[in-house]
Image: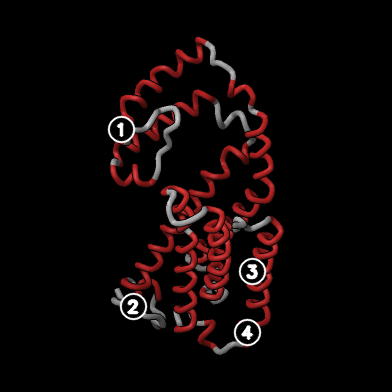
Amino acid sequence: MKRMDLGDRPLVALVAGAAIVIAVYFVLVLPALPPAWRTPGSAPLYVAGAAGTVLLLVSMMFVLVKRTGRGGPPPAWLAAHVVASTIGAVLVAVHSAGLLRRAPALLFLALIGLVVLGVWARVRLSRRMAATFGTKQQSFTPASAETRERFAPVISQKRELLPAIDPAASEGTFSLALAHWLRTPRAAFNYARLVRAENRLMGARRSVGFGQAYWRPLHLALAYLFVLGIVVHVMTVTFFAGYVAGGEPITWWHVTNW
C-alpha cells in the first residue's frame, strides 16, 4: 500500500492558496457582504470561528499520534494536520472580520507564525536535518574516559528513575511517551530534566545550526501560546461578554455579561 504523504510542492501550494483566499476575501469579498459579516461575534462569524477552532484542534491529533504510536500512520496524520490547520486558519481569518487591531488578533499572528515556521521546517530545514543524521560519524566512536566520567552521574540517575516509569525499558533506548507523562508525571518530569542535562553535556544544540536547534521549541511555544489564547478567548467572550464588548452591544452568544 502506498504511504500517504504530502510533498513539498503541494504543501507550499496549499499554504499559498490559503493566503491568496484570505487576501481576496478581505479586499474584494468582505466589503460586499452584509453588515453581519463585519460585526464581531455575529452568527456567521461565530460559526466560522467555532469551525476553525475545531479544525485547528483536529490538527493537534498529529501530536498525539506521534507521542502514543496509535491512531494510524504518522505521515497520514501529518497531511491531515497541515490541511486541517490551513483551512482552520482561513476560517479564523473570516471570524476576525478584518479587525486585526484588537487583542484577539494576536492569536492570528501566532497562527501565522506556526504555519510559516512549519512550512520552512518541512521544505528547507528537513534537508539540513537529513544531512546532519547522515554525517554524524563521531556519534558511533567510543567516548573518552573524561566524557564517560561527566556522563556517569546523569546516566546513573536515569537508570535509578526508569523502573518507576517503565520497568521493562532500557535506559539506552528509552524515550518518554505521552502515556508515561499521564501515568507517572513526576517521574517523567524528572527523567526529562535528566535528558536535558545529558543533551547539554553532549552539546547537541551546539553541534547544529541555530534554526535546527531551536525551531521545534519555538514551534511548540507558539502552539502552546495559541491554545492558551484560544481558551482565554472562549472563556472571556462566553462568561465576561460585557467586559469584552466594552460598553458596546453584545452581538454573540454568551452565558453571562459580566
Q: Is residue 101 visible?
A: no
**Going by the image, does 110 lie left or right of 125?**
left
Label 2 neighbour load within 10 Å: few <14, some 14-19, many 20+: some
- Looking at the picture, tell me which residue is in the foreground, 26 or 125: 125
Number of numbered tags placed on the structure image: 4
Disc with the residue nearer the chain's start (3 vs 2): 3
Report x, y in % for residue 202.
52, 24
In the figure, 257 relative to 107: above or below? Answer: below
Checking the image for residue 167, the label placed there is: 1
Checking the image for residue 31, the label placed there is: 4
- Amino acid carrying mark 1 in the image: Pro
Cβ atoms under marks 1 and 3 closer than 8 Å:
no
Q: CA distance from mark 2 to mark 1?
A: 49 Å
Label 3 neighbour load within 10 Å: few <14, some 14-19, many 20+: some
Query: What residue sits right under mark 2 in the picture?
Result: 254
Question: Measuring 68% from the left and 39% from the top, which residue is drawn there?
Answer: 128
- Amino acid carrying mark 4 in the image: Pro
Checking the image for residue 231, the label placed there is: none
Question: Measuring 53% from the left and 46% from the top, which residue is drawn there?
Answer: 218
Q: Secondary structure at mark 3?
A: helix
- Looking at the picture, tell me which residue is in the foreground, 170 or 242: 170
